[in-house]
């Protein structure tokens, strides 16, 4: 018997789907039957549930039906990921990384990488052998290293490279089960060698703390909003025995390397850095004469034992070497470059080209937005003349 035609007088469906997004969730409405089935299937690991439709729906398919389903679904992934990041802002370390865990122990590894450099491919190839936690945003509690799963569908570029990408659920791709109690045991940066002239043995290479920060900080979200976020990240790295660089040609080759990294508990290392104190993070205090430079306040900073100074201002990480750290520490109050050289000389001999080195350091710091030069005609002397 053919199905009865829909009754136009029937009340509209008053329900929405609530999709888990890490520490938060998004709600969607207006899906067709096929679209609803696809969301239920591809987002199943995120805890999809039917809820009552309210005015607070995050994404309304019924008002955006002109947009293709593939594009709308890709935008939904972006929205959910933004919500996941927003919920962890200021409380969690969040890495742009895939995260997999040993299925028996829950020891997890974060595989950090910039977009388009192999993170999703590595997840697809390695995921069937591990517990799948996320391929996009690893959400880590700095207090106990617990990982909040965000097992979203993977955004896959279909053959031919046409966009938008297709969203394929972890069950469809055969990825390992998601664990709710995984703990971060290793953190690594993916370094895929493409078109190598010779075979590339897959391997893990330890990274010193400053090099690790240079690779990892650009792959974090809202680090400056986490209290002493840079210090928290350095402390995490020390607890995990430092970061690793995973060098490989094909993702499949990484499995024995990752197995080895997760087989034993991480061995903490002694810090090769010390945190800056509040005064060293603060802006220069006091009046500035014309031509003097004052440092801007930064969110966080550390001084490595090799003398390199690492500063975090907003989303920007700056590493100072050579005379740069000494210039930064000298600027408790605004100073002209000439007075900076004199201040450095108070602590010991300075090289013959100290003035040129200080000028170069000041220019570099100013270019990075970490120093501000007081313009000519400004300062207390000029104010006195104008009064």
Image (tube, rainbow, N blue to C red):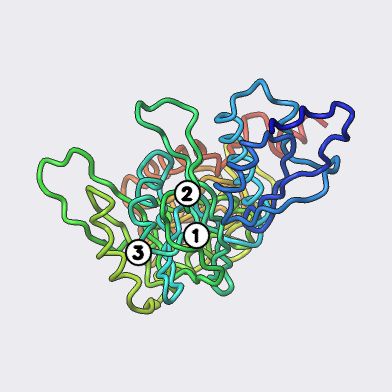
Label 3: state its secondary structure.
loop
**Do the CB atoms of the residues marked 2 and 3 lie less than 8 Å apart?**
no
Q: Is residue 168 above or below residue 331?
A: above
The outermost residue toward the top is 66
Give the Cα distance between marks 2 and 3: 24 Å
Crowd class of label 2 (few under 14; some 14 to 19; many from 20; radius 10 Å): some
Res 272 visible: yes
Q: Where is residue 18 in the image (x, y as percent from the top left)?
A: 71, 50
Task: Identify the residue position indicated by label 2 in the image.
Answer: 219
Numbered mark located on residue 306 in the image: 3
Q: In which quarter of the image is residue 358?
A: top left
Give the Cα distance between marks 1 and 3: 36 Å
Q: Which image quarter is the N terminus in?
A: top right
* Residue at 36% over, 54% down: 189
Q: Position of residue 145 (x, y in %)?
A: 53, 71
Res 347 visible: no
Crowd class of label 3 (few under 14; some 14 to 19; many from 20; radius 10 Å): few
Task: Identify the residue position indicated by label 1 in the image.
Answer: 133
Q: Is residue 281 above or below residue 143?
A: above
């Amino acid at each position: 018997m053919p199905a009865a035609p829909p009754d136009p007088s029937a009340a509209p469906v008053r329900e929405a789907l609530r999709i888990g997004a890490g520490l938060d969730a998004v709600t969607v409405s207006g899906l067709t039957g096929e679209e609803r089935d696809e969301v239920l299937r591809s987002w199943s690991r995120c805890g999809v549930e039917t809820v009552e439709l309210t005015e607070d729906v995050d994404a309304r398919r019924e008002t955006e039906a002109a947009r293709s389903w593939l594009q709308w679904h890709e935008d939904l992934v972006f929205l959910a990921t933004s919500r996941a990041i927003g919920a962890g802002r200021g409380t969690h370390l969040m890495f742009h990384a895939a995260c997999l865990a040993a299925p028996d122990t829950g020891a997890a590894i974060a595989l950090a990488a910039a977009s388009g450099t192999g993170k999703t491919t590595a997840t697809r190839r390695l995921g069937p052998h591990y517990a799948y936690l996320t391929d996009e945003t690893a959400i880590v509690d700095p207090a106990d290293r617990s990982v909040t799963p965000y097992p979203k569908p993977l955004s896959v570029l279909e053959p031919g490279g046409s966009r938008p990408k297709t969203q394929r659920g972890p069950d469809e791709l055969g990825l390992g089960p998601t664990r709710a109690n995984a703990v971060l045991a290793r953190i690594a940066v993916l370094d895929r060698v493409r078109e190598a002239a010779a075979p590339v043995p897959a391997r893990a290479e330890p990274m010193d703390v400053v090099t690790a920060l240079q690779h990892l900080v650009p792959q974090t979200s809202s680090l400056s909003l986490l209290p002493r976020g840079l210090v928290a990240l350095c402390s995490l790295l020390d607890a995990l025995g430092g970061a690793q660089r995973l060098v490989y040609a094909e993702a499949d080759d990484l499995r024995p390397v990752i197995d080895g990294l997760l087989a034993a508990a991480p061995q903490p290392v002694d810090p090769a850095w010390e945190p800056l104190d509040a005064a060293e993070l603060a802006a220069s205090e006091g009046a500035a004469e014309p031509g003097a430079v004052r440092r801007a306040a930064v969110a966080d900073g550390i001084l490595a034992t090799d003398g390199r100074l690492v500063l975090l201002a907003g989303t920007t990480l700056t590493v100072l070497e050579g005379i740069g750290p000494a210039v930064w520490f000298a600027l408790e109050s605004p100073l002209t470059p000439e007075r900076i050289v004199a201040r450095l000389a108070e602590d010991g001999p300075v090289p013959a080209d100290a003035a040129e080195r200080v000028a170069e350091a000041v220019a570099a710091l100013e270019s990075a937005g970490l120093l501000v030069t007081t313009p000519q005609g400004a300062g207390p002397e000029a104010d006195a003349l104008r009064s």
